[in-house]
Image (cartoon, rainbow, N blue to C red):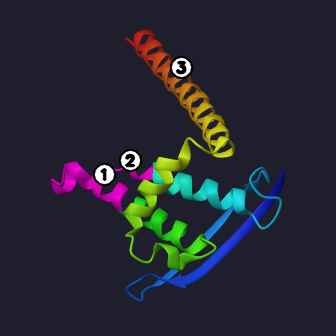
Amino acid sequence: MEKSVFEHHSEDRKGNELIIKCEGTDDQELAKFGGLDLHIKATREMISNVSAASFPEKDGDLDIYYKIAALYLNEIGYLLRNSAFDSELFEGNTNIELVKMFLDDFDKNPILTKLVEKDDKEIKEYDAKMKKEEDEIWSSTMKDLNIKI
């Protein structure tokens, strides 16, 4: 496993400066070059971190997570469009329609299904590990409180 660093300087779609910097281990499972695995890890972390925030409670927008998911899916459609060999084939389709088309064909691609099954297994194992650690911390805290009382 190799440590990797990337720093991306660009502008958001409104023209505001955007700098993204990431450092971590590039597992080189998805690609053997260029820190692509680290890029995926960083993106996953940013996506999963959104749910830890308490947006709905602060702003009263109970649909915020659906809005966030819709924007992420739209961006995935944009990725699909721009990574196609002939993006002109998708000219009449929205980004969301491209996501739907991708999902409709997903089960037909054993490479993708195997990749996602492996990823789902890793997610479940990670979640179980985090729950176990939280339970141990909670148990230890309760034990400490009982001793002090």
Q: Which mark is residue 65?
A: 1
Gap between marks 1 and 2 measured at Cα: 8 Å
Gap between marks 3 and 2 measured at Cα: 23 Å
Q: Nearer the viewer, residue 52 or 72?
A: 72
Gap between marks 1 and 3 measured at Cα: 30 Å
Nearer the viewer's eye, disc 1 or disc 3?
A: 1
- Write the start and end of the magenta stretch as one range: 49-70
Q: Which residue is mark 3?
A: 136
Q: Answer left or right for 35 relative to 130.
A: right
Identify whether 45 is placed above or below 117: below
Q: Which residue is mark 2?
A: 51
First along the sequence among labels 1 and 2: 2
What residue is rendered at 42% in x and 14% in y?
Answer: 148
Q: Residue furthest front?
A: 89
Residue 97 part of the magenta segment:
no
Element type at mark 2 = loop
Residue kind at label 2, given as amino acid type: Ser
